Amino acid sequence: MALVPGRRIRLRSRGRCVRKRPPGVGAPGGRELRRISNGRDLHRSAVNAVQKLLRVKGGLKAYCESPDMLLEAEGARECPFCGDGHRLRLHGHYSRFALLPGDQEPQRLPIRRLLCARTGRTVSLLPDFCLPRRQHGPAIVGTFLSRYAEGAPLLAALRAARPDAPGHSVAQSLRRGFLTRAGPIRVYLARLRAQVLEPPPSPTGRRREVAALLVGLCHGIATAAEAFVHHGVDLHARFQIGLA
């Protein structure tokens, strides 16, 4: 029987019906993230790191002119798989799309890939205006969640950051991705400051959950967009996860 994306298949196994998703459907990584509620098991996932998120001086224009500028970043070529942090080999480039705030055109970016010759595993160097495994960048996600916490409807909040946002499901996915990471984000914020900052009293439900995290992330930074770019790098370096 042909596989249809999104369709569940029933298989018979020892007299029982077993539900199984077709290959590539679903996101088991999300379930794993939901089990991460504190800092105890977070370092364990670092051994599986295949991406490094690095700060870019000069933004998108500077990066497009010289993608290999990230090779000069501190720790960029240190191996995350081997204990001695030996130097990784250059291993070509690949392309990925990135969505940026406002009406900016989607960007096709060259991404530098590195190789650990001992393990055969690769590491990709991502600029800070990208989110790992998301086309929407951190500036979009920060602006979107900020508007949502202030009371805007979900899709309207996303379109305030990216007017051509395709639909409600994308906004739901970004919000869910952010809240799924609430535990690691709280651990990260606790390391920055001892006092927990309370959100405004008005939001309720999921808005209040989002607002509570935003208060900590945006403290001392002018905009949510800037805060998400700034903290996205440090959070990924610490826990190997993006902000959404």
Image (tube, rainbow, N blue to C red):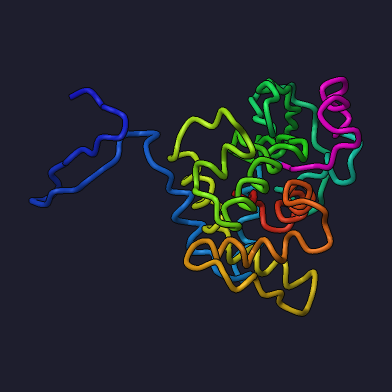
* Residue located at (70% from left, 51% from top): 236
Relative height, residue 99 to residue 227 (above, below):
above
Residue 23: % across, % down: 35, 34
| Image-based side of 195 in relation to 18, left or right | right
Q: In this view of the protein, can residue 64 be seen by the observer?
A: yes
* Residue located at (37% from left, 36% from top): 25
| Image-based side of 18 in relation to 35, left or right | left
| Image-based side of 210 in relation to 102, left or right | left
Question: In the rendered image, which quarter is residue 88 located in?
Answer: top right
Residue 181: % across, % down: 57, 58
| Image-based side of 68 in relation to 216, left or right | right
Toward the left, the furthest residue is 15
* Residue located at (73% from left, 73% from top): 190
Say which of 209 and 186 sits in front: 209
Residue 43: % across, % down: 66, 62
Q: Is residue 59 magenta?
A: yes
Q: Is residue 141 magenta?
A: no
Where the N terminus falls, by quadrant? top left
Task: Please report the bounds of the magenta region as a residue range.
Answer: 52-70
Question: In the rendered image, which quarter is residue 51 located in?
Answer: top right
Say which of 104 and 81 sits in front: 104
Relative height, residue 136 to residue 3 (above, below):
below
